[in-house]
Image: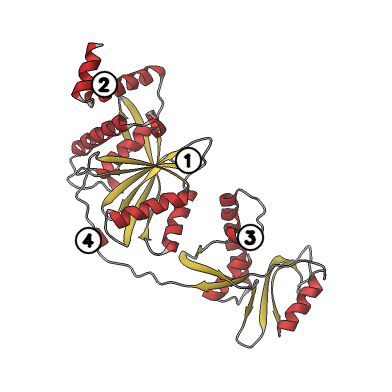
Amino acid sequence: MSLIALIYKKIKGIHTCDDLVQILEMGNQLYSTLSQFTGQVYLNCKLNYLLSMIDLSEENYQLNYKCIGVSIYYIDNGNYKIFDSHARDEYGRSHPSGTCVLLEVPSIQGLVQCFQTIHSLSDNYELRGVQISTYEVTRVNNLREEHNCSCKQCSAVGLYAMCHSVAKSCSYWNSRTLCCIADQGNKLYHNMGINRCLRMADLYTSLDICGVEISVQHKAQSYGMLSTSLNNTKNKLENLIFNNYSGNIGFLLWLASYCITCIFQQTVRVKYMFSLLTYEDTCEPAIQQIKISGIPPLVQAISNIVTKKLKADIVHYEMQFLSCTSNMDLHQIKHMEKHRQKCNYDNMEPAPKKKRLQQ
């Protein structure tokens, strides 16, 4: 609450009771998010639980923490104001029917006397300074045209890979599996008859994988900008992934016109495990799979793609979260296994294929 109060004062100023209500609502939302990140219901005051970026009224603000300070700020008339989110009366004393308060004192000595009145003289305290800075992000026009990708099949291959993970977990994929996915994804692209990279509006709502129908639900969509040099844009992407992790199988992410695929691997040992897939028909192998543990490393890997693949520092993105399901019976599972074996055989090198025929 105190952190939100300082930011709110910096951006808008605290003038009315409605401002205090807004601060409480935003503070509760921040507390809930931090509790989910840390896995703790009651957060302590250690520095590692303070964010370096925060969303406030759909704007991003970068936070730098320095020296000392609490939820107290200096105002133009020389006085100090104290924001307290706890139930207080008009004098700042604890009261069961009280509200959050914004107290004003005339001096540093007044601050000391105020806290001596409210708290015991033997109470410990911790002071923390907060410097709040705002950044204006300059939007670069025509990024899609500047960073066009020659690979038009990448999103179709990504969609097929995501559906394929329902039938066979990507934890067990090997080079043959990836080769099969690349081939089938290319067939899907050519069957669609679209001579361009697929966008969100082009995605199917169902797909046939080895004779099994996979239902594809389009979940949350997001548009934004990713800068490799501004942490606040990376943090916003991290929050998007975190907030949409449950109930989804992954997402397709268009960086300019290049699409990459991220599949959520549900594991017992690691909470946030991902398979990041990239496809480029001019490379060998065409499809690459990177297994990543943790949301920040995932976003950093995406940032590296922007730098190395697109040769850019800043790029617009479109993001589509997907949920894929199927109702496979035992017969369909066996049919899919036979299809996998046939696909693996078709992609086998001549020498191993000949050896297998002789067995």
Number of on-image labels: 4
Image depth: mark 3 or mark 4 in front: 3
Q: Are marks 4 and 1 in contact (CB under 8 Å)?
A: no
Image depth: mark 1 or mark 2 in front: 2
The disc, 4 or 2, on the residue closer to the chain's N-terminal end is 4
The disc, 3 or 4, on the residue closer to the chain's N-terminal end is 3
Q: Give the labeled residue for mark 4.
A: 146
Q: Amino acid at mark 2?
A: Lys
Q: CA distance from mark 3 to mark 1?
A: 32 Å
**Which residue is more in the foreground, 177 or 28?**
177
Q: Quadrant of the C terminus?
A: top left
The quarter of the picture where residue 19 lies is bottom right
The disc, 3 or 1, on the residue closer to the chain's N-terminal end is 3
Image depth: mark 2 or mark 3 in front: 3
Image depth: mark 4 or mark 1 in front: 4
Q: Amino acid at mark 1?
A: Gly
Question: Is disc 2 placed on a helix, strand or loop?
Answer: helix
Q: Are marks 3 and 1 in contact (CB under 8 Å)?
A: no
The quarter of the picture where residue 26 lies is bottom right
The disc, 2 or 3, on the residue closer to the chain's N-terminal end is 3
Q: Are marks 3 and 4 in contact (CB under 8 Å)?
A: no
Q: Amino acid at mark 4?
A: Glu
